[in-house]
Image (cartoon, rainbow, N blue to C red):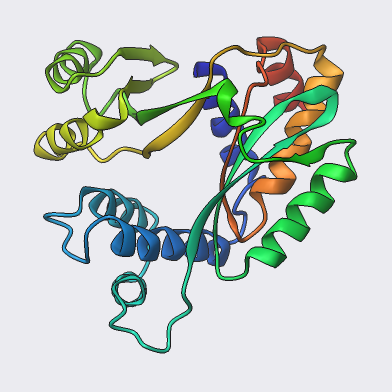
Amino acid sequence: MSGHSKWSTIKRKKGAIDAKRGAIFTRLAREIAITAREGGGGDTNSNFRLRLAVDRARAENMPKDNIERAIKRGTGEDKEGVAYEEIMYEGYGPKGVAMMIETVTDNRNRSVSDIRHALSKSGGSMAEVGAVSWQFDRVAYFAFPASAMDYDKAFELAIEAGADDVTEDEGIIEITGPVDCFKAIADLLHTAKVTPEDAGLRMVPKQDLELDVNVTLQVMKVIEDLEEMDDIQNVYSNLKVSEEALAALEAE
């Protein structure tokens, strides 16, 4: 996961994703709305997915009114709010790179059209349900700065919660584990007053695909184009992001 984590850090520095504050708020509001609806209501004390989404929104200085409106939209209290649905699409990028594309949308026809266009113009394509997903495992994932909690303490916490792996790379600690451990890990981090920079249920490839640097950068550009779309929350792929590719990206 560390290569993808470094890639995310570089993208944030370059402003390649969510360059505008409004785009960040739009994505966060959709995440809050869908977790309020799917995760068990609008109470952050009982809905841990919602609590994490709200924590991330606060970390981005999202106004309190925006957060409350998004929660009410998800719970149905805001009758005039847009109804969102969470959909995972499957596809292939250049050189057959497998992609799982997570969306939160109010118009699935628009989402499919935009994704198909982005993939096809790069030589990729949409895939049938199940054609790609078998190449991935779904895991609980958390990432936070090592300054918030040192590695040894994070390791102890993660093992207590049933996690599978804890890594530290360039000041970022990542915890991964079975999906059913998500709440336990989230609760222990919350108790320790650690707010993850990234947390959720992720799709992790069972086997990475390594390509040469130029092709890797081409695929990374396709993924970035997808991630910049309003409807798309996350893009997961089996692309192995090498140190050489990261260095080339940072030098651009």
In which quadrant will I find the C terminus?
Answer: top right
Q: Count the labels in the image.
A: 0
| Residue at horizontal 54 percent and vertical 15 percent from the top | 206
Is residue 47 shown left or right of residue 98?
Answer: left
| Residue at horizontal 60 percent and vertical 59 percent from the top | 231
Residue 131 lies, with reference to residue 14, above or below; the image says: above
Can residue 6 be spotted in the picture? no
Residue 40, position in %: x, y?
22, 58
User: Observer-nearest residue: 18 or 182?
Assistant: 182
Residue 67, position in %: x, y?
32, 69
Is residue 57 shown left or right of residue 15?
Answer: left
User: Observer-nearest residue: 9 or 52?
Assistant: 52
Residue 59, position in %: x, y?
34, 52
Is residue 106 shown left or right of residue 95?
Answer: left
| Quadrant of the rendered image containing residue 101 | top right
Residue 33, position in %: x, y?
37, 66
- Farthest residue in the bottom direction? 80
| Residue at horizontal 39 percent and vertical 20 percent from the top | 171
Is residue 64 shown left or right of residue 201?
Answer: left
Can residue 141 be spotted in the picture? yes
| Residue at horizontal 80 percent and vertical 24 percent from the top | 96
| Quadrant of the rendered image containing residue 93 | top right
